Amino acid sequence: MEEVDVTGRIVAPGLVDLHTHGALGHDFNEADADAWQTALNHHLRAGTTTVLATLASDTPARLRAVLETATRLSGDGLPLAGVHLEGPCLAFEQRGAHRAQDLLDADRTSDLLTPLPAIVRMVTVAPELPGAVDLVRRLADAGVVVSAGHSSAGPEALHTAKLAGLSHVAHLWSGQSTLTRPRLHRVPGLLEASLASHELTAEVIADGHHLPRELLNIAFRCLGPRRLCLVSDATAGTGLPIGTGYTVGGARGVVEGGYGAAIDNATALCGSVLPLGEMLPIARDLTDATTEDVVIMATRTPAEAVRMYPRRGSLRPGALGDVVLLDEALKVRSVMSRGMWVVPPDALVAAAGPSRGGGADA
């Protein structure tokens, strides 16, 4: 049995990312197994041992082909734990990087998911759209986690969707309606309704670019570490040099200093270019969260949000054996997946040589 000296290290569960689109020039909207393996292994080596591969809105034929690819790859020892469909039932005015021609109404989205592929673990919808509540109910009844996002929903629409089974909210402040005052009274948007909720979980992209310190702290204070999930929203630009172009869904971006900028709209962000592990120190530096809080928001809370805890996101007996070692700066130093070192500790390298199988290079 190997013994590892973890002096000076934080021993944490492997990171759980519910919202990531790709890496190293590859987007999960590609129906290519090699592309998926490259992107997944990049995130694995960066500490993310559980990935919900996130698909942007696309044509039904392309989405079906991609879901078939994901199904074939499941169970291959990769960090792939399922697919998160971000769309295509989204609000036109809040679509962000999603192409308008790829958006579908609730009925056509339901047709796309008939029969429902087992690989689908989460679907993000705009709950205010016609027929969306029935879609939410159908998905929730089938065990799929339903998220509100890219939406102009207000409190009433969100409440109705919650009653139908919606339990999560995609990236706060991104693609969400906010407070308006159409006449005398202020009307909350999806953002305020989400922050005021008592049971919903929600995501923030803590890359230091999507949200400033003040907004990250508002989310943390409203929801706390047991309902706020850190997600990367990492794109194909992740791991690429500055100035490199990439695509996410139908949008084109270019890697800038720590973020992705939309090529077709210089005033917009185009996803993140950081893996989840690199966001841990940023989240701690920009919020009131403790080290323990940050680790919980990147492990236990997202795992609970998609009902995979304690098998994932924990170090409890019976868990998968996913572990990361962090230094005091919260930098990922070592990664274990299913009991095997992917990025071994220095002490293990010195004592035992290269890691034994099962990792990203296997």
Image (cartoon, grey):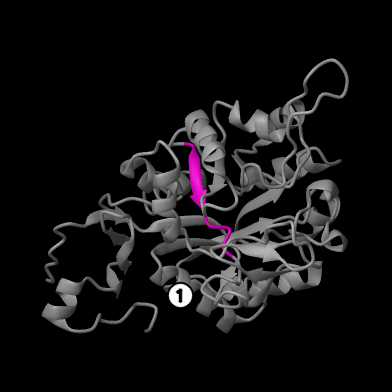
Q: Is residue 233 magenta?
A: yes
Q: Is residue 302 magenta?
A: no
Q: Position of residue 246 (x, y in %)?
A: 67, 75
Pick whichever, 107 or 177, lies toward us. 177
Name the residue: 81% across, 58% down. Answer: 111
Report helix, strand or loop for mark 1. helix
Answer above or below: position of 146 versus 188: below
Image quarter (top left, top right, bottom left or bottom right) of the C terminus: bottom left
Q: Position of residue 177 (x, y in %)?
A: 75, 37
Name the residue: 58% across, 80% down. Answer: 35
Tag 1: Cα neighbours inside 10 Å, few (<14), some, or many (≥20)? Answer: many
Q: Which residues are magenta?
A: 227-234
Name the residue tied to disc 1. Answer: 41
Pick whichever, 139 or 233, lies toward us. 233
- Type of the residue with mark 1: Asn
151 left or right of 121?
right
Name the residue: 49% across, 37% down. Answer: 227
Q: Position of residue 155 (x, y in %)?
A: 72, 27
Q: Is any part of residue 307 visible from this angle?
A: no
